[in-house]
Amino acid sequence: MAITMVISILLFLMLMFPVMNLFTRNEGKWSVKEKQSTTAFHLAEGGADRAYWKILESVDMWNATSTGTIAGYNFDQVYDDIGGGYYTIRISSDPANPDARIVEAAGKDLGSRQVRRIRMYLVNTNTGVKFAIRSEKVLTNGGGNPHVEWGPVISNGSIIATGRTFPRFYSAGHVTTQDGGSSTASTDDVYWWSYYPVPSAPTINFGFYLSSATGSGASPCGGNYYTVGDRTFMGCHDKSGKTYYITGNAIFKSGAGGNHITGNVIALGNVTFAGNGGSANAPDGSYNAALPPYAWKEYGANWAHYKIFDPAGPATYADAVSSNYVATGKTYPLTGVLTHGMLYAGGNMELSGGGNGIFHGVVVSANDSTTDTSNFLIYYDPDIASNIRLYTSPVTIVKGTWYEVKGEWPPGL
């Protein structure tokens, strides 16, 4: 029996040896294949990172990919600067989001020629001027009267928005009283965000505006468009669309038929108002203003107020969201507009007079901004915002979602 058992064991081992040998050899192959697949994946990751840093070079790179692609980043070049294989990249626009780009990178290892591909979304959070009013320090927009319409409020400091239910408030600090004093990022995901990663302020090309004002010569309101020192506006009616560039303070006063300026007012000092700044007495400041197509996004917490501007619009905010509503061809009458353009203060902005000053366009303050008393109204105009001259500066890119996709190595490479 002992001899029989030994012979049986030997026969079993003789039969199992080829199986074990095959298993061992296959396991080695599988390990090598897995290593090669991992290498291909890391090569694809390296390609995606290369595309990310390419986009960060300048706003020109970002703009170049809005309607097409750039050389070397259209599956038209193979890169071999990472050990173990090759990779190629394509950067394209996102039809669903003009502030995003799609990066697709394919990696191939040297051994088995395995291919792995990943897709990544890049989002530009510094896309220019997309706000009604912005302050680089504390922005006060409290009180019971509405002050900002049709566009969001942004501050690199805190925002005091007591009693407000619109528009949207984005603050790098507190949004008072909405956040309840929270010291960490918090939001209702509708109209206020505290400790929000506020994008860098757009860099206004002051050199362009200085040159424009200097070349414009005399103003119909007396003096020149370029003013060294302070300038007072009283009875100024100017619909030329030109820029007033003031190295000191800009002061708006009532009297002499009121003020209305269609154009930009840039003051490197403070901007202040006496009463309503004269806007209520300026009949040339009354017109039908175009309602921004996405103004409705500012009124998620007060839809009834939005319906004042767009009575035939969606019945609820939820309806507007679900249909991605676009208000096309809508207008709203504005009366007594003080300025229609960009209003900039290099110092403080104090919209705190006793009247009903109205601003249509974009308001920017390099320091504090106060819109806390009376009925000063700011209506956002996206056309004014898009035409503000900015320096070409690096874009601010945030990496969005990324995932692996199926795909072969691009043909012809």
Image (cartoon, grey):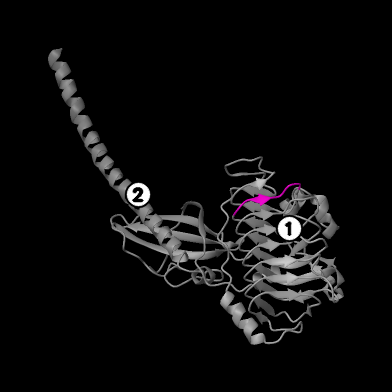
Residue 409 can be seen, yes or no = no
Between residue 198 and residue 376, name the one nearer to us.
376
Q: Position of residue 354 (x, y in %)?
A: 82, 60
Q: Which residue is mark 2?
A: 38
Q: Residue at x 81, y 65 (%)?
A: 276
Q: Could you tell me the amino acid type at mark 2?
A: Thr
Q: Earlier in the sequence, mark 2 or mark 1?
A: 2
The dot on residue 336 is none
What secondary structure do most residues of the magenta stretch adopt?
loop
Kindly report the distance in space between the C-alpha atoms of the residues bearing marks 2 and 1.
57 Å
Position of residue 10 in the picture relative to residue 224 (left or right): left
Q: Nearer the viewer, residue 244 or 231?
A: 231
Whole-percent x, y for residue 117 in the image: 43, 56
Please say if 166 is above or below 261. above
Question: Front-most of 39 and 353?
Answer: 353
- Which residue ends up furthest to the front in the rendered image? 229
The residue where tag 1 is placed is 371
Viewport quadrant of the N terminus: top left
Q: Residue at x 85, y 68 (%)?
A: 280
Instruction: Write the start and end of the magenta stretch as one range.
Output: 157-163
Q: Amino acid at mark 1?
A: Thr
Mark 2: few/some/many CA within 10 Å (<14, 14-19, 20+)? some
